Image: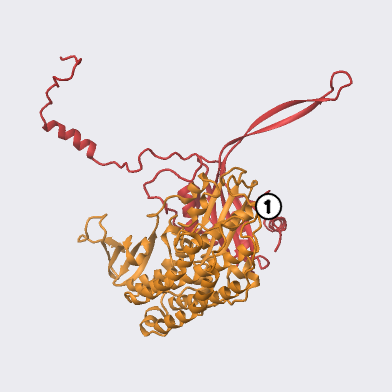
Amino acid sequence: METPEQIRDRLLARIPGAAVSVVVNPGPAAQHSLLLGAAHAREIAEFLRDDPGLQLDFCSNVSGVDWLDREIVETIKTPTPGPGAGPATFAEQKIRRPHPGYLEAVYHLYSMALKHGPVVLRLRTADRRDQVTLPSLTPVWRSCEFQEREVFDLFGIVFAGHPDLRRILMWDEFRDHPMRKDYAEPDDYEWEPTPHGDVLAKAKRHYPAAEPAASVKGEAKP
Amino acid sequence: MSVAEVSPLSPAPGSRVRAVRDQFHGDLLEISMGPHHPSTHGVFRMVVTLDGEIVVKLKPVFGYLHRNHEKIGENTTYLASMPYTDRLDYLCSMTNNWAYALAVEKLSGQTVPERAEYLRIILAELTRLLNHTCLAGFLLQDGGCSGTPLMYAFREREKILDLFEALSGSRMMCNYQRFGGCRVDAPPGWLEAARALADNYGRFLDEYEELLTGNEILMARTQGIGRLPARLAVSAGVTGPMLRAAGVAYDIRKVDGYGLYPRFGFRVPLGDHGDTYDRYMVRVLEMRESIKILQQALRDIPAGPVMDPKARLRGFRAKPGEAYGRIEGPKGEIGFYLISEGGPNPYRYRVRPPSFINLTVLEDLCLGHTVADTIVILGSIDIVLGEVDR
């Protein structure tokens, strides 16, 4: 099968204006992935599925990944001549720059026709707060249907063009996205707005006011 | 007049049964099948719209058993997730263990001794035998055949679970495999017992098939029911026996050749029609191939260690990177996607659950069939809710 670099070059030649780059996997698996720009993702996915050399007809796995905002610290060393004839010393300067976080959807594609794979696709949102929309690939591979719903449910990525984007594992009224790294559990999962509080408050009117407890010491009586 | 209008006679919205008046077809009935019913194989619900007895719409509802397995996996060490993978598909803990061990081994570049690879294959094929046997029993139970096939299946399953217990100390929650090999070697006499079981299993299958395969009622209830076209199966990511019953030759044991599977001679049975009967038959034929693999593995298993001596379990850390490891589980492709940032926990721990993704086509299979057929079709998909809901 072609390497991710070859696929990238073919995609760039075939679809002008598409943003495709290779993300290097530094681990021993060395399974590099293709980072796609959201604008042409659907077109690229259709090409990968229909291209006779690739025929990636099977989208096996869709996972969300949450990458938090980070601060990258770079150390720059500038050589300064040492005192006298001694060896040169290095003045260290640390530069901190913010690295904005994003949500990522990762697709593992295989070919059932040609029995090869995987090709790993990555799509990234602009940020983690309000620009969290990505194009849905469900029209290309039906197997994304439930998995994209799950990523929407647990990570909060909104898949534009998904036929039925609802929560799938959490209940519909749930607010947050539990797989996010900064998710805070609610204090009480069981809380729900029931009339008990109001009913209790009303019920109090039916009882005579309690006698001030004489046995309580040290309490000022009106 | 609008096409679908709520009848004035219908109960208040929010009740479980709603009548929808439709000027062309009379009453459509929306009912909720499940979540608490033996035929749903756990806590699983289908919101079904019926025209008479015919299903015109079906939406599965998940999540009753959701405990966010993946989040827990991110908050525990690599080793501590191993026993938790048992609880995914709780009938097939050995294959879950293997898939997870394979993903971690890919992530860290570890190797596995040969004896451990043989043990893994033996255990995976035993798991396939027990899963498919039970599935056939449950399928017949769903079809209304109360008791007999399921009791036969459970009798045989118990023999396999005895082997698992002798090896790992637990019948179902085996927690047996480790990245870099297997936890302990087989006790004395275990391999002989496994060999006896593999040699006798064919006779049980003959008996079972005599009871079921040519059975008129089974054929009437399953042939032509829930046909899955090959094209839809591929697009919907259906894997495992369900895919092969639709006629697509895709078995990860052959395609990826993970473990030592390329050394073994076995065939991949395929279905013709993709209906419920084919899904039953493919599983029976797969069991016969599993017996062949077991006999070869138990004949050829070499002596030696079962753990890589360099493997480190406690305090295990993987280099930064990611890996996706998958195997052919009894229900389909079970995979684990791991991202490491170099810490003691995975940064991302994702399970690719086969039965969850196989359910994508449930509505397509059930449309136009009756309620009774829906039960049988769901039974033939082979779901375990521990894995669907995670």
Mark 1 — on which chain does it sit? A
Q: Is residue A69 left or right of residue B279?
A: right
Q: Which chain is red?
A: A
Indicate the secondary structure of the residue bearing disc 1: loop
Q: Is residue B89 left or right of residue B268?
A: left
Q: Is residue B204 left or right of residue A114?
A: left
> Is the C terminus of chain B in the top left, top right, bottom left or bottom right quadrant?
bottom left
Residue type at mark 1?
A: Pro
Q: Which chain is orange?
A: B
Q: Is residue B84 above or below residue B57?
A: above
Query: x, y percentage for residue B378?
Result: 40, 68
Q: Residue B134 versus residue A137: which sits nearer the camera?
A: B134
Q: Residue A48 versus residue B347: which sits nearer the camera?
A: B347
Residue at (72% x, 58% y) in the render: A6
Query: x, y percentage for residue A1?
Result: 70, 64
From the image, tell me which residue sits under label 1. Answer: A28
> Is the N terminus of chain B in the top left, top right, bottom left or bottom right quadrant?
bottom left
Q: Is residue B292 above or below residue B351?
A: below
Query: x, y percentage for residue B257?
Result: 64, 67
Q: Is residue B208 visible?
A: yes
Q: Residue B383 versus residue B310: which sits nearer the camera?
A: B310
